[in-house]
Image: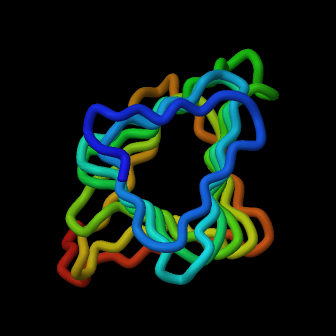
């Protein structure tokens, strides 16, 4: 568990965290520019749980990868800030979900991804949003200046299930 007030600083390339059960993050996950973090979910029960109001800033040229059979769950009002520069696409930060990993808001939660960067889903990596039963909501973007490149590579998936009660 990363307790409230604790900080996990990610510096440089090749950083890995292997998760086999539940890892709660209530503190800060801080990425320096040009850093890399791979979260390896090594069992079906592996789960990373971010607390409510989590804010994660992905600086220039950051690569944050989640891979494996488990789940990453974000608490309500969590925000992922992609802090790339429109002028330098090669240095866009990237959030990568792959190898059967599932990333989802907690039941009843809304999570926002905003800024300038990449969201990449590959090899059965899944981004999940469900209105039925769980009311899990993703918001992409915040202003017209945001630019989020969504790539579905191979068998990357976005799972959506709307509410039968929706009267739009």
Q: Give me the residue at 34% from left, 73% from top.
A: 130
Image point (47%, 80%), residue name: 45
Tell me the residue at 81%/28% (across/down): 90
Residue 69's place in the image compared with 39, above or below, is below
Q: In terms of depth relative to the viewer, which is nearer, 65 or 152?
A: 65
Q: Is residue 33 left or right of residue 8?
A: right
Instruction: Tell me if 43 is positioned left or right of 132 in this view.
Output: right
Picture quadrant of residue 105: bottom left
Residue 117, horizontal then vertical, whole percent: 63, 34
The x and y percentages for residue 10 are 59, 33
Which colour scheme appears in the figure? rainbow
- Up the image or down, 153 lies above or below 63; here it is below
Indicate the position of residue 38 as horizontal and vertical percent values.
67, 51
Q: Quadrant of residue 129?
A: bottom left
Residues 160 and 62: in front is 62
Image height of 91 relative to 28, above or below? above
- Count of marks, rendered view: 0
Q: Position of residue 93 (x, y in %)?
A: 66, 33
* Quadrant the C terminus occupies: bottom left
- Above or below 121: residue 27: above
Q: Quadrant of residue 56?
A: top left
Camera sees residue 81: no
Q: Judge from the rendering whether residue 111 lies leftward or rightward of residue 57; answer left or right.
A: left
> Is residue 15 visible from the viewing direction of this image?
yes
Q: In screen coordinates, is 8 left or right of 125?
A: left
Q: Looking at the image, which residue is at 35% across and 56% down? A: 24
């Amino acid at each position: 568990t990363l307790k409230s007030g604790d900080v996990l600083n990610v510096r440089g390339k090749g950083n890995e965290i292997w998760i086999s059960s539940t890892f709660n993050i209530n503190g800060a996950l801080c990425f320096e520019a040009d850093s890399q973090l791979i979260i390896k979910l090594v069992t079906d029960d592996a789960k990373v749980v971010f607390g409510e109001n989590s804010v994660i800033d992905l600086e220039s040229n950051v690569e944050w990868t989640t891979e494996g059979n488990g789940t990453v769950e974000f608490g309500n009002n969590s925000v992922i800030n992609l802090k790339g520069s429109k002028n330098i696409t090669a240095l866009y930060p990237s959030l990568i979900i792959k190898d059967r990993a599932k990333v989802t808001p907690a039941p009843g939660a809304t999570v926002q991804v905003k800024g300038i960067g990449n969201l990449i889903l590959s090899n059965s990596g899944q981004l999940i949003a469900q209105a039925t039963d769980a009311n899990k909501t993703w918001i992409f973007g915040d202003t017209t200046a945001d630019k989020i490149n969504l790539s579905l590579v191979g068998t990357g998936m976005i799972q959506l299930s709307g509410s039968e009660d929706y009267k739009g």
